[in-house]
Amino acid sequence: MRIRPANLVDIESCQRLDGSYTTDYVWRMEERVGDDTASVTFRRVHIPRQITVAYPRSLDTLPDDWQRRECFLVADDLGRIIGFLDMLVHRWRWRAQVEHLVVDRAYRGRGVASHLLRAAERWARGSQMQSIEAILQNKNDPAIRILQQRGYRFQGFLDDYFENGDIGMVFRLYLL
């Protein structure tokens, strides 16, 4: 497997990848409000049965994302695209944001996502970004676990962030 910058021909292959995922865990939000305090915590909970969750974003914008010439990487296994990572750059904040991280179902659990993240982190450091941010569904325990293993820290949440109303959990890796 080789991680490399995407080219225009790769985009169609990226759009065909299935970004859905299965999980046995979700991150449940618990809110406590008192007279002078409010707190929100997320707790990882085992659910009664495994669920399959559809990928929450459209891949229709990938050609436009690629044309920005920022950070669009693919995992290439002997000419077959098995995953990709698309990252937006907010130069005014010197922050990169992972928009898409998708790995082909047949290659999950083999470190492909970690290799893509590692390459994106190198790119971000070389581009003098201060941090990388990723916003994930609270149901996406597999991706949350990968980010945590790579040192990304929970930074907060965005209610109704995804089109289906799911909460977006914000994770950030500080690069400095």
Image (cartoon, helix red, strand yellow):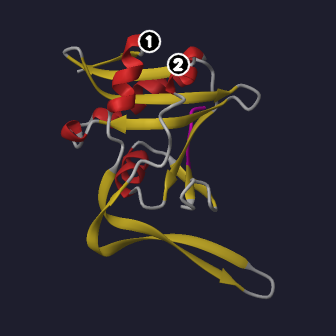
Q: Is residue 122 above or below residue 9?
A: below
In the figure, is residue 93 to the left or right of 12?
right
Residue annotated with mark 2: 66
- The quadrant of the picture occupied by the C terminus is top right
* Local crowd size for mark 2, using a 10 Å CA cut-off: few (<14), some (14–19), many (≥20): many
| Of the pair 156 and 103, the residue shown nearer to us | 103
Q: Position of residue 61 (x, y in %)?
A: 54, 29
Q: Position of residue 83 (x, y in %)?
A: 33, 30
Residue in view at x 22 percent, y 43 percent: 109
| Of the pair 149 and 82, the residue shown nearer to us | 82
Q: How many marks?
A: 2
| Of the pair 8 and 168, the residue shown nearer to us | 8
Q: Where, by quadrant of the figure, is residue 76 drawn? A: top left
Does the residue at mark 1 contact the one at mark 2 (Cβ under 8 Å)? yes
> Which residue sits furthest right?
36
In the figure, is residue 76 to the left or right of 121?
left
Residue in view at x 53 percent, y 36 percent: 99
**Residue 14, magenta (yes or no):** no
- The quadrant of the picture occupied by the N terminus is top left
Q: Is residue 85 above or below residue 159?
A: above
Dot 2 amino acid type = Trp
Dot 1 amino acid type = Leu
In the figure, is residue 158 to the left or right of 55?
right
Residue in view at x 57 percent, y 53 percent: 163
Q: Position of residue 157 (x, y in %)?
A: 61, 59
Q: Where, by quadrant of the figure, is residue 34 drawn? A: bottom right
What segment carries the magenta color?
Answer: 171-176
Residue annotated with mark 1: 8
**Can see residue 29?**
yes
